[in-house]
Amino acid sequence: MQFYRIYDEDLGQASYLVGCTRTHQALVVDPRRDVDIYLETARRHGLTIAAVAETHVHADFLSGARELAHATGATLYLSEEGDARWKYKGLSGFVHVGLVDNDTFFVGDVRISVRHTPGHTPEHLVFLITDPDVSQEPMMMLSGDFVFVEDLGRPDLLEELGSGPGQAKAGAEALFESLRRVFLELPAHLQIWPGHGAGSACGKSLSAIPVSTVAYELKHRWWGELVRRNERQSFADRLLAGQPEAPLYFAKMKQLNRDGMTILGGVPLPTKLTPGEFGKKLTEGGALLVDTRSKEAFATRHLKASFHVPYGYKFSTWAGWMLPYYRPLILLAATRDEAEELMRKLLRIGHDDVIGYITDLDDIAEIADFGSVPRIDADEAFHIWEQDEAVFVDVRSNAEYDHSHIPGAVHVFAGRIIKDLDMIPRDRPVVVHCSSGNRSSIAASALLAHGFDKVINFAGGFNAWKEHIFPEQTARSTGTKERPGKHGELPQLH
């Protein structure tokens, strides 16, 4: 048997290619949308992709299952479990097989056993992989979003995405039963290869380690003893507590992955725009410029109404949070290769309408209207705060804000700032901050693009505020601002 893991660091998403050494047939599980990487991996190892499978209807990326089946003629193996709301559609023209609990299918000599593991989603499946040349026992489980290394799939997404109240609790209870019914019965040696790793929003504490075993996870994770002792309520309470904010684009991914999306037929190459083409697409075509430079470069000079989503800082996730799907996009990227890489990342979250790129703002200087974002350090931020000269907007996560924040700061998570603009006063300067200046730069660009004209980025963020021992408070404290003396004598409002 051959086995290859293909990992997207940006989304923290893993897909797998499993090959039979005798027949040279291969299975791909949970592929991303730019499928040339699977075609090349198969070609390099002398394999033919004969089957494509999914563990569930994904929320965090646009699936490449249909794309890969279209490119290869492979059979699609998709869940037939769960309720009607999450049954796959848009399968006309594809050879497909619906899978239910305890089904088995083969790719060459490799046996794939199917188990239904609802919880993260109602239709979720895991695949137990057996290489009969070695043993009749399964070697590994491709666990999707059922069990991660150090974590479990979050059961609250459907409720977060608007499927109705009670879904999170029901999902947690279903996951508990799946662990008892399926996971506890698995052999201790079984390898766990999950669908996500560190940085994914599909859980709250995923590890960067790519693989674990059933025995190790049961012994060393918080949930192991609770599942063994059948403590359902304690399990559900702990699992649901502290889940990260669900990106708004997840709802669109769920719908497209269920119903079907445009077949690309290959990855389109980006087009470099002349200044004239750029200006026309901006003014007549309603295009939006996505500035992918550093936060420092964006602050110094940027095209007014552009959005800042920096290259290399979880680009796909933040593009999903911030960029509208109803407008064509133009990239400001350093090179053509970088533009192509970013275009792929956008395709993976369903942004197909990338109409070109530019590499230098100087090229459009004669037709552009530029702006800047003042950046302040901790001492300047403290002076503004002490004099009550501006509204402080904390764009960190709920958990970060609850742990500690600048007294009086308005909390609006960066990813939801466009949705929650009405929480921020427009009649005063706005000082935006996160922990170190990355998320605040993204949020500042969104505020400027939506008509806020006095936006300041506290570049050092809350980390710098804490280093200066300036006042802070928790979400549970009732302390108010106090005028401090020397830095070492500042009150701590915990």
Image (tube, rainbow, N blue to C red):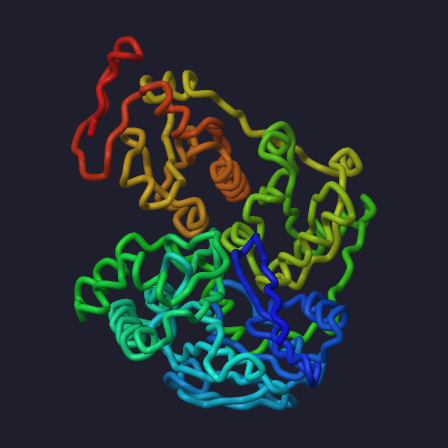
Instruction: Give the residue drawn at x 76%, y 41%.
Output: 359
Return the residue nearer the eye: 263 or 188: 188
Q: Is residue 355 above or below residue 172?
A: above
Instruction: Give the residue drawn at x 63%, y 88%.
Output: 94
The residue positioned farthest toward the top in the image shown: 486
The residue positioned farthest toward the front in the image shown: 134
> Can you give x and y, in whole percent of width and height, for residue 20 in the image?
65, 80
Return the residue nearer the eye: 119 or 452: 119
> Can you give x and y, in whole percent of width and height, for residue 340 in the image?
73, 54
Return the residue nearer the eye: 200 or 134: 134
- Name the side, left or right, on which 178 lies relative to 126: left
Q: Is residue 475 above or below residue 86?
A: above
Return the residue nearer the eye: 348 or 200: 200
> Can you give x and y, in whole percent of width and height, for residue 32 in the image?
60, 67
- Name the side, left or right, on which 370 lies relative to 436: right
Which quadrant holds residue 72?
A: bottom right
Q: Is residue 366 above or below residue 166?
A: above
- Name the side, left or right, on which 40 lies relative to 301: right
Q: Quadrant of the N terminus?
A: bottom right
Q: Is residue 59 above or below residue 488?
A: below
Tally of numbered discs: 0
Instruction: Give the residue drawn at x 73%, y 41%.
Output: 334
Does residue 47 appear in the picture of this structure?
yes
Q: Quadrant of the C terminus?
A: top left
Instruction: Give the residue drawn at x 27%, y 61%.
Output: 223
> Can you give x and y, in whole percent of width and height, for residue 413 in the image?
39, 45
Which quadrant holds residue 188?
A: bottom left
Does residue 279 appear in the picture of this structure?
no
